[in-house]
Amino acid sequence: MKLTFCGGAGVVTGANYLLETATTKILVDCGMFQGGHETKGWNEKPFLYDPKDIDAVFLTHAHLDHCGRLPLLYKEGFRGPIYATPPATELAQLILEDSEGIMKMRARETGMTLLYEHSDVAGVQRLWKPIAYQVRQKVGDIEFQLRNAGHILGSSMVELWIEGKKFLFTGDLGNETSPLLPPADVITQADYVVMESAYGDRVHEKVEDRKDQLERAIEHAIKNNGTLLIPSLAVERTQEILYDLNSLVENARVPHIPVFIDSPMAIAATEIYQRYHSYLSAQGQEQIKSGDNLFQFPGLTITKSRDESKAINAVPPPKVIIAGNGMSTGGRIIYHEQLYLPDPKNILLLVSYQVNGTNGRALQEGNKVITIGNHQVPVRSKILQALAYSGHADHDQLMAFVQDIERPIQHLFAVQGEDEAAQTLVTNIRDEFGIDASVPKIGEVVEL
């Protein structure tokens, strides 16, 4: 058996792992590299394998850094099944179609070469094999099942049984305190573990704090007659914010002011959340049964078209604008940031992980000027954070996850984290549990 780290190793994004037996080759995730100069040009590099030789792909969840290069995989000859939960397949297809549109727009503006065509995105759609949690199947000589990862709707861990050994790929593990999703399943046995480490050196604020932080940001905007901007991931983060806004408005903790969801993808994703409500937490399902629309409240407006988006500017403050993307590297949020960041009356609330090299990271670190397109945008608005909205497990939750797995674990690989976070987590796992653990590099091959 052989495991190759083709992405997501030493960096947060680009998750892509190749596992080979004597007769079968499978991939776990095939994600896009995102961020700044560190990964510039990596998406255009050839795969470290021949896509035609891959027997199957397992998609842990629908975020672009886990699914974004599936159309390129198809373009280069992959025709096997792509296994994921039903909501993950729908969300991933939505994200791939959106990504294609953004890529074409940038190609028109910059002359960049397209990674793939619409026919490749359509090709991926034909390969989806939706599978429920805990349904065991086989690909070649590999037996597998998906388990709930608690990260976003339909997110999965992948359990694989090969030659008497069990492999666990965690994908992104969820923040167990999320009120919208159930916590990740407890895993009690694995020989080899490939585990995320995005927050491997940090502990989140308490989940109870996040609604208070959102309330304070809205109150600050009202007091200053300003605009609150929230750069947000279209999948999961926007739905979490809508869920909390619904509660704040219904309980009269904030007054009715205009709230705009300025993201066609977030609007479509919210519809998928409503269809697959059986994947939500018990609390969320109970609220739906009682007749509560979790994502709708007075004052909310959705803006699908560009004209509707532009019309937001004519609405006087105070107001709230939630738009993609979460790291301020594209999407409609960058147009609002150009307009609103120079005004000290306004606020920008960060609710997502900010990859190194992104405008979101620059704002988080207090930069007074950011670059959007060809424009130098002065930052005079107040920058706040509500990191309890993170959809990732933090250091303590990751340690608890490992503690539940019976010994011996033959090896644990920490992936999908910046070097300091991954190294901190590995050191603590070694010291506290005596487990052989390491931080692999992209291109590293491990014989098992």
Image (cartoon, helix red, strand yellow):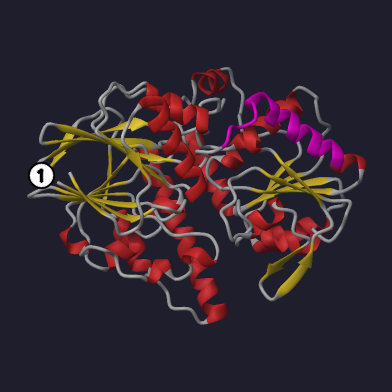
What kind of element bears circle 1? loop
Question: Residue 308 vs residue 290: left or right?
Answer: right
Q: Residue furthest bottom?
A: 111
User: Does residue 256 appear in the picture of this structure?
Assistant: yes
Residue indicated by mark 1: 140
**Total marks placed:** 1
Q: Magenta span has 204? A: yes
Does residue 182 lie above or below 201 as drawn?
Answer: above
Q: Position of residue 32 (x, y in %)?
A: 42, 59
Residue placed at 29% from the left, 62% from the top?
A: 73
Q: Position of residue 154 (x, y in %)?
A: 41, 36
Magenta-drawn segment: 202-220
Type of amino acid at the residue the image marks with label 1:
Gly
- Say which quarter of the image contains residue 368: bottom right
Does residue 64 lie above or below 433 as drawn?
Answer: below
Residue in the foreground of this view, choosing between 35 and 338: 35
Residue in the foreground of this view, choosing between 364 and 240: 364
Question: Residue 89 vs residue 393: left or right?
Answer: left
User: Does residue 149 appear in the picture of this structure?
Assistant: no
Residue in the foreground of this view, choosing between 321 and 270: 321
Magenta stretch, overall SS:
helix
Q: Magenta span has 289? A: no
Residue placed at 70% from the left, 27% from the top?
A: 209
